[in-house]
Image (tube, helix red, strand yellow):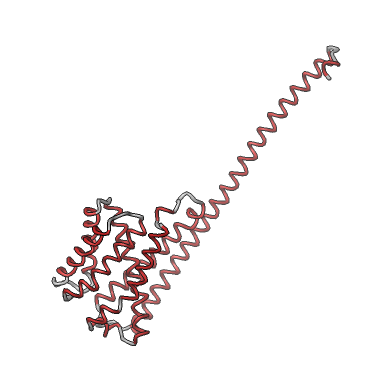
Amino acid sequence: MDKMPLYMILLQSFPETLILIYIGLALTGAKLSNKKVIFVALAGAFFSYFIRGFPIPPGSNVFIQLPVIVILLSITGQLPLWLALVSIILGFLCVSFTEMLFIPLTAAISGISIQAALADPLCRILFPLPEFLFLTFLIIYLRRKEIHINTFNIDRPEIKMYGKPLVILSLSVGLVVLGFYFGFYMQPESLRLNSISVVLLSVILIAVVLSLTLSWKMLSMARQEKLVEIQQFHISNLQEMTQIIKAQRHDFVNHLQVIYGLVSQGYADQAR
């Protein structure tokens, strides 16, 4: 059980859910009115408040809350279920990854440990503020520049060549982040950065090495495919040029035969 005061839901859970939805929608290019987004975020935050009262492990409420937000977003915003799901997954990954970066940094700058911040309601509200500000500016930038996954043309050669390896690498890092995120909230009292640093770094190192190896293999295959395409293009041009030369040679031979016939019949002047 991880019961939170109601004001914590309004000052922490609601803004976090709101940012999660906004950045997910920005990344997918989905359009939704601010009123509907705020409604879904409020509903998701209050749902989180109620499920925290059940005897479930701390942190597992996230995996119950997110499917509810997906369904609410799909119904309220009249979005396809797959689009709502992708939006929430992308938003959750961005928020989780940013949190893993900013929370330790904020703790190092402020001198307040993560355990002390989790135990103090005021620190628990103030600690995410740098993360929220960063994500807010990121959302504004993405929406103004209209940068989202639909703007990428998958038929472009560079997307074909580098797209899959980058997706695999991103998923690998995302899984590491999710694992750390879940472990962090499952046992916040027993978390000791010194004790988990070796294991965490080992997991990250293994994931990155495997991802880079697989990405290198896929890049090599992509380069080979690109080389084959270039060779096929040159062969096609060569075949086309050969056909043109054959046609011109055929015309030239016909022209010579006509001239020879005219000359043999004594029409040399006409042959000229």
In the rendered view, would you say 30 is above or below 170?
above
Residue 48 place in picture, x, y as percent: 19, 68
User: Disc count in the image?
Assistant: 0
Residue 245 place in picture, x, y as percent: 70, 33
Q: Of all residues shown, which one is farthest toward the bottom?
A: 111
Q: Residue at x 24, y 75 (%)?
A: 186
Q: Residue at x 23, y 71 (%)?
A: 13
Residue 260 place in picture, x, y as percent: 81, 18
Q: Quadrant of residue 142?
A: bottom left
Q: Residue at x 40, y 56 (%)?
A: 149
Of 197 and 98, the residue lying toward us: 98
- In the drawing, does residue 231 fall left or right of residue 269? left
Q: Quadrant of residue 43?
A: bottom left
- In the drawing, does residue 227 fall left or right of residue 40? right
Q: Of all residues shown, which one is farthest toward the top?
A: 265
Q: Residue at x 44, y 54 (%)?
A: 152
Residue 229 place in picture, x, y as percent: 56, 47
Quarter holding the C terminus is top right
Quarter holding the N terminus is bottom left
Q: Quadrant of residue 105?
A: bottom left
In the rendered view, would you say 242 is above or below 20?
above
In the rendered view, would you say 102 is above or below 42?
below
